[in-house]
Image (cartoon, rainbow, N blue to C red):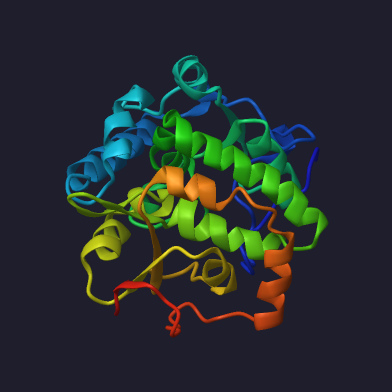
Amino acid sequence: MAVEPVVYGVSQRPPRGDYTRADADYTCAQNWAAYTEADHDTYRRLYERQMALLPGLACDAFIEAIPLLGARDRIPRFEDINARLKLATGWELVAVPGLIPERPFFDLLASRRFPVTDWIRTPAEFDYVVEPDVFHDLFGHVPLLFNPVFADYVQRYGAGGLKAHDLGAGELLSRLYWYTIEFGLIQQADGLRAYGAGILSSSGELRHSVTSPQPQRIALDLLRCMRTRYKIDDYQATYFVIDSFERLFDMTAPDFGPLYETVRSLGDLSADTTIASDSAITLG
């Protein structure tokens, strides 16, 4: 085995994916020829379902970029997307066998290489899969990498992650990833919309995050975000909202070192906590 497999959270399930194919940086060849017609059909059905849900729920930048993924009736070849993506923002996709450790993950993002899991869920997991698969990574994450500002934010996150790893603050910074890149909401002129990949690739959470009266939605504050634990097995109880990708990029420019110390001194908050300083958009 070239590298050690990675499990999700505290799961005792065997890791998905063939890690024997991975190089030291956890990347591997996509092995597109290994996909079956059933795999392509699963991708097609997932794609069609999500596309039907996007209007009024997904942000404009995401909807505008979706066609740049290319093939919708089968799993795209990463090399075909890269031909367009490199020209647009200088990013490229690299295949990985599954979840990868923090340090290699941050290294890839900092060098504008986005890791995409190359296996796809089974039909039995059509509505929910524990680990990210190729549909989640491609459909959820890749379209916004065509947006120059958001693409720069993801690279900045990777560079910040390398520093956080050295400071032992990886868990704190992971909450920023979770609540922005995975489960972020944005306030557009015509209403609240989703931009996070975990929302955009999920039929249930897409509706829930934007329209449900149950969760609380608060303006993104870095300190508040990094103090807030998150759920991995249910819809989020709290969503953080930005008003533009430019604002998100500017917010993450300062050195996070002092912020980590403040977070540690104040302690964690549960996923459904409300505090007096919250700038609430909706309260659950």
Q: From where the camera sits, is residue 135 visible?
A: yes
Q: How many marks?
A: 0
- Is residue 17 rendered to the left or right of residue 238? right
Q: Quadrant of residue 98?
A: top right
In the rendered image, the quadrant that contains the C terminus is bottom left
Q: From where the camera sits, is residue 5 visible?
A: no
On the image, the x and y values in percent for residue 97 come to 62, 39
Give the residue at x 38% y 73%.
Answer: 279
Give the residue at x 40% y 29%.
Answer: 75
On the image, the x and y values in percent for residue 28 come to 66, 29
Q: Nearer the viewer, residue 239 or 41?
A: 239
Q: Nearer the viewer, residue 255 or 272?
A: 255
Would you place residue 226 above or below residue 159 in this image?
A: below
Would you place residue 35 above or below residue 50 in this image?
A: above
In the rendered image, the quadrant that contains the N terminus is top right
Would you place residue 150 above or below residue 125 in this image?
A: above
- Is residue 33 rendered to the left or right of residue 15? left
Give the residue at x 68% y 58%.
Answer: 256
- Is residue 131 rendered to the left or right of residue 195? right
Would you place residue 212 above or below residue 155 in this image?
A: below
On the image, the x and y values in percent for residue 232 come to 50, 67
Q: Nearer the viewer, residue 183 or 126?
A: 183
Give the residue at x 55% y 81%.
Answer: 269
On the image, the x and y values in percent for residue 65 come to 33, 30
